[in-house]
Amino acid sequence: MRKLPFILAIATVALTAASARKQRTTRRPLQTDKIEASINPDSMVSLRPADIRLAGYDKPLRSRRETIFATNASPDSLSVKSIRLTITYLDIRGRQLHRRSVWIGTEIPPGQTRQLSFPSWDTQQSFYYRLSKQPRSVAAPYDITAVADSAAIAPTRPLSTP
């Protein structure tokens, strides 16, 4: 007799669990969002080397990000919205380790400087920039050359119409 309530409780739980429908928690079909860059082709320009000045690059040994300072030296009426940098990574002997181009979204008004930060190329965190603080552990130093190839720009004030 004592086992009867226990057996009934187990049977009730088993029956309700069996009748409960398995619930799917993911939505089907899964698709990635298709986001297109909304850069007007008229606002894309090739730069002269003097239009964007780059300085102050840094990437310590265990850092997952690289930083560099960019100064907008373009004419007074043009504000930079994003910059494409091409960075070449070189070992101490001048041999190429890696080369990449990266778009960095930023707002740089004319004549001003901004610090740009982007993910590091060194995913294993085994290199450090030669002018950064020298690490205590053994690591390989490297040097870079960085060039601002192109930029998306916008006028800082409305253009006058004739």
Image: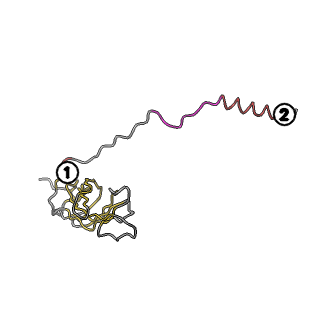
For the residue labelled by badge 2, is the local secondary structure a helix, a strand or a loop?
helix
Q: Is residue 68 left or right of residue 124?
A: left
Region rendered in magenta: 19-28
- Give the Cα separation between the discs numbered 2 and 1: 80 Å
Q: Which residue is identified by label 1?
A: 44
Where on the picture, by quarter, is residue 85?
bottom left
For the residue labelled by badge 1, is the local secondary structure a helix, a strand or a loop?
strand
Where on the picture, by quarter, is residue 59?
bottom left
Q: Is residue 40 left or right of residue 136?
A: left
Does 125 appear above or below 130?
Answer: above
- Residue for point 20% across, 51% down: 44
**Magenta-drawn stretch contains 23:** yes
Q: Which residue is identified by label 2?
A: 3
Q: Amino acid at mark 2?
A: Lys
Where on the picture, by quarter, is residue 5?
top right
Q: Which is more toward the observer, 21 or 152?
A: 21
Q: Is residue 25 left or right of residue 153?
A: right
Residue located farthest toward the right when viewing the structure as drawn: 1
Q: Residues within 10 Å of mark 2 (few under 14, many from 20)?
A: few
Residue 149 horizontal/vertical position (percent): 19, 55
- Residue for point 46% across, 33% down: 28
Q: Residues within 10 Å of mark 1 (few under 14, many from 20)?
A: some
Q: Amino acid at mark 1?
A: Met
Residue 39 horizontal/vertical position (percent): 25, 48
Residue 86 horizontal/vertical position (percent): 23, 56
Does 59 appear above or below 13?
Answer: below
**Magenta-drawn stretch contains 34:** no
- Residue for point 17% across, 53% down: 45
Q: Earlier in the sequence, mark 2 or mark 1?
A: 2
